[in-house]
Amino acid sequence: MINLVLFGPPGAGKGTQAFKLKEQFNLIHISTGDLLRSEIKMETKLGLEAKVIMAAGKLVSDEVVIGMIMNLMSENKDANGFIFDGFPRTTIQAEALDKMLATFKTKISLMLSLEVEDEELIRRLLLRGKDSGRPDDQDQQIIGARIKEYNDKTAPLIEYYQTQEKYRSIKGIGAIEDIFLQLVSAIDKLK
Ligand code: ADP
């Protein structure tokens, strides 16, 4: 199995690259943000709770997102591998993911981190907000809160994966195809 963590701040391009990588390597793409938005759309209890937290740019509870990942993985036991996009976002989530993968007798192959500076992130997110209708992409204060959550709670995961020698940093600025080729080349080196 190839199991990838696609990492980086909000607006780094994780979703765009995850879509291309999933096609290239025949993997299952799991985006916790997409899963949460679909719960909101279906107006489930979980969705109603998550909506308020997401609108404030805060992280949804570890318990909730870990539960969602667990469900999806058990529905895809025969998968070639997974791309985790927007997960893990805290150390507790990263440890839970390692445990879940161990029950599948597999592990994370690589953590690919897309590096983009804050100014460019804010520009991209505001632009995306114009089309996507995502409320958390339309307000500079909420975007600021999301970047702060990333720096405080998520960025420390770089060290978590560095210690396991799985961290690869890739510049997330430039043509989508060029960034994709760099990601592919990092994954190909695994073989
Ligand atoms: P982005 O990476 O652009 O912030 P996402 O779609 O990944 O967009 O996430 C949107 C929001 O969903 C986050 O701001 C957060 O509130 C919630 N969320 C997504 N994934 C997680 C997670 N793994 N843990 C906690 N909250 C999450």
Image (cartoon, rainbow, N blue to C red):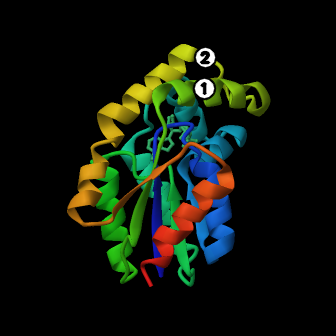
- Residue 140 location (% of width, % of height): 56, 16
* Residue furthest left in the image: 163
The answer to whether the residues at label 1 and label 2 have Cβ atoms under 8 Å apart is yes
Q: Amino acid at mark 2?
A: Asp
Does the beta carbon of the residue at mark 1 sit less than 8 Å from ligand 1? Answer: yes
> Which dot marks residue 158?
none
- Residue 137 location (% of width, % of height): 63, 26
- Residue 151 location (% of width, % of height): 34, 33
- Residue 48 location (% of width, % of height): 59, 33
Q: Which residue shows up at 70% across the image and 27% down it?
A: 127
Q: Is residue 165 left or right of residue 11?
A: left
Q: Which residue shows up at 36% across the image and 83% down it?
A: 105
Camera sees residue 71? yes
Quadrant hosting residue 156: top left
**Position of 68 relative to 188 (above/below):** above
Q: Amino acid at mark 1?
A: Asp
- Check disc 2: other Cα within 10 Å, few if <14, some if 14-19, many if 20+: some
Q: Nearer the viewer, residue 152 or 190?
A: 190
**Position of 104 relative to 10 (above/below):** below
- Check disc 1: other Cα within 10 Å, few if <14, some if 14-19, many if 20+: some
Quarter of the picture containing the C terminus is bottom left
> How many marks on residues?
2
Q: Is residue 71 left or right of residue 149?
A: right
Element class at badge 2? loop
Report the residue marked by disc 1. 136
Q: CA distance from mark 1 to mark 2?
A: 6 Å
Report the residue marked by disc 2. 139
Q: Nearer the viewer, residue 187 or 135?
A: 187
Q: Which residue shows up at 38% across the image and 30% down it?
A: 149
